Image: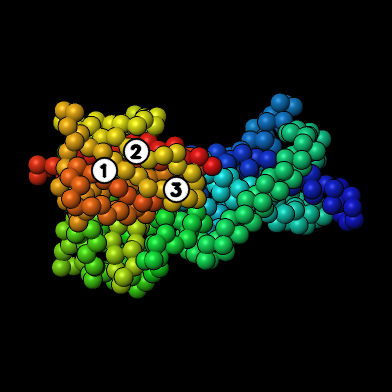
């Protein structure tokens, strides 16, 4: 084996690309599965690291096993060849995913997710190259495989081309995200929410919220990460400041000091709760989750004149029956016979849209009662990452009777959103859901 010069560089590059293939396969599968199932950041990273080592060792071992080497001989070769290289790649690429704002919170359908992952893997390969070069020059690392005379895995040239494409794609995506953040006032450094838009109104509320568990020195902490399926349970949580102290001073927003939203990852099982605040600063609410799966919990509140929406994951054990998002339709009907029609024109990403909902029952218009300080309450969640959109009611003429319930929001990106409208009639609150398809 060469110990210096271009020959050593070529062998080190080949070893790095070989190792990068297994590492990338494991990392992609781990991050995709962890993100899709709603794992925590560190749970997703742990899964990705484990699969990266598994795939890396497997790609090295299979050609050796096919050549007739015993498993007892192959295992030490794979460990000596790949361990330090994979460890370097995993340390670097997962650190980048944690550093890039919003990367770990983005859904698998979000271009930021794939862009950050592509960029991270390529940079990880660049860091692993000098490590492999140093090992090979000293007769270690990938030399263990070369000494067997058996070579396998995907062609190095093909891997190099794929890595180059990934580098261009990932760099382009991150540059675009950075430019969008700057154009929107530089808020993107805190959460991915601001990368999709800046101030939606004079109050400075971002159109997308709820993607992170912490922001601006505040953090949502759930007392339990899992609830039983079926019967009524108590969900307890608190908002803590930068020093870890429970927050107790909240302002009233939409007639309440705290709005707790719970929705399953497939955008079913929506619940809007108003928890009680204990003297110890812990909020509590009774909740029933009849179906298994991963849920997203949003704490929506106002403090010091600023609106906050913090999100965290909650799990219900058992086989989950995931549903496809319903197609977009102009009307929906509640279980007790109210028909609601949406009269909003075709929505476009990046532009503020006004949503109007007309309520009828038995063919007759319904003059809804006030609910939470307005004619209705609307929650909008984006398919995939369940980004929580800032929505505010639009004042209507009180003398118009059964006028449509109107809201204003900005859809930050193309795709599908689920709109959960709540209105009040005859003293009862009714909920209906719509799917909104937003064009580019």
Foreground tag (1 vs 3): 1
The secondary element bearing badge 2 is classed as loop
Marks 2 and 3, how far apart in space?
Answer: 16 Å
Q: Which residue is mark 2?
A: 343
- Quarter of the picture holding the C terminus: top right
Looking at the image, is mark 2 or mark 1 earlier in the sequence?
2
Q: Residue at x 84, y 52 (%)?
A: 9
Comparing 70 with 273, the one in front is 273
Residue 109, x across and y down, in percent? 51, 40
Within 10 angstroms of label 2, few (less than 14), some, or many (20 or more) residues?
Answer: some
Marks 1 and 3, how far apart in space?
Answer: 20 Å
Horizontal side, residue 30 vs residue 230: left or right: right
Q: Which residue is mark 1?
A: 404
Q: Residue at x 24, y 68 (%)?
A: 250
Q: Which mark is residue 411?
A: 3
Q: How is the image coloured?
A: rainbow
Q: Residue furthest left?
A: 426
Looking at the image, is mark 2 or mark 3 earlier in the sequence?
2
Comparing 168 with 282, the one in front is 168
Residue 20: which quarter of the image? top right
Up-down relation of residue 159 to residue 7 (above or below): above
Up-down relation of residue 258 to residue 292 (above or below): below
Q: Residue at x 35, y 57 (%)?
A: 310
Q: Are marks 2 and 1 in contact (CB under 8 Å)?
A: yes
Foreground tag (2 vs 3): 2
């Amino acid at each position: 084996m060469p110990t210096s010069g271009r020959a050593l560089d070529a062998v080190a590059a080949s070893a790095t690309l070989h190792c990068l293939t297994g590492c990338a396969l494991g990392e992609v599968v781990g991050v995709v599965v962890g993100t899709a199932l709603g794992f925590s950041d560190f749970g997703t990273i742990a899964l990705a690291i484990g699969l990266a080592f598994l795939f890396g060792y497997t790609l090295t071992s299979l050609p050796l096993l096919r050549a007739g080497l015993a498993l007892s001989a192959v295992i030490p070769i794979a460990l000596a060849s790949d361990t330090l290289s994979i460890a370097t790649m995993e340390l670097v690429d997962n650190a980048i995913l944690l550093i890039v704002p919003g990367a770990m919170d983005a859904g698998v359908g979000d271009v930021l997710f794939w862009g950050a992952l592509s960029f991270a893997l390529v940079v990880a390969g660049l860091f692993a190259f000098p490590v492999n070069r140093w090992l090979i020059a000293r007769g270690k690392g990938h030399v263990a495989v070369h000494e067997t005379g058996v070579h396998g895995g995907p062609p190095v040239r093909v891997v190099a081309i794929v890595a180059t494409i990934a580098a261009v794609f990932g760099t382009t995506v991150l540059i675009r995200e950075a430019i969008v953040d700057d154009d929107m006032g530089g808020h993107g450094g805190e959460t991915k929410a601001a990368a999709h838009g800046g101030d939606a109104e004079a109050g400075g509320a971002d159109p997308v919220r709820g993607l992170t568990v912490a922001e601006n020195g505040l953090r949502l902490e759930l007392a339990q990460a899992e609830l039983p399926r079926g019967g009524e349970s108590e969900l307890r949580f608190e908002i803590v400041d930068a020093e870890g102290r429970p927050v107790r001073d909240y302002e009233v927003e939409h007639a309440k000091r705290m709005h707790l939203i719970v929705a399953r990852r497939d955008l079913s099982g929506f619940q809007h709760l108003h928890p009680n605040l204990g003297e110890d600063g812990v909020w509590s609410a009774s909740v029933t989750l009849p179906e298994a799966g991963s849920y997203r919990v949003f704490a929506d509140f106002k403090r010091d004149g600023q609106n906050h929406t913090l999100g965290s994951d909650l799990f219900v054990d058992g086989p989950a029956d995931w549903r496809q998002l319903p197609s977009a339709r102009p009307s929906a009907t509640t279980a007790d016979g109210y028909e609601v029609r949406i009269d909003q024109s075709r929505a476009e990403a990046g532009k503020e849209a006004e949503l109007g909902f007309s309520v009828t029952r038995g063919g007759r218009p319904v003059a809804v009662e006030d609910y939470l300080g307005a004619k209705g309450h609307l929650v909008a969640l984006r398919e995939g990452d369940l980004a929580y959109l800032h929505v505010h009611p639009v004042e209507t003429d009180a003398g118009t009777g059964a006028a449509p319930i109107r809201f204003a929001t900005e859809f930050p990106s193309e795709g599908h959103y689920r709109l959960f409208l709540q209105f009040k009639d005859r003293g009862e609150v009714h909920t209906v859901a719509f799917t909104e398809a937003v064009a580019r």
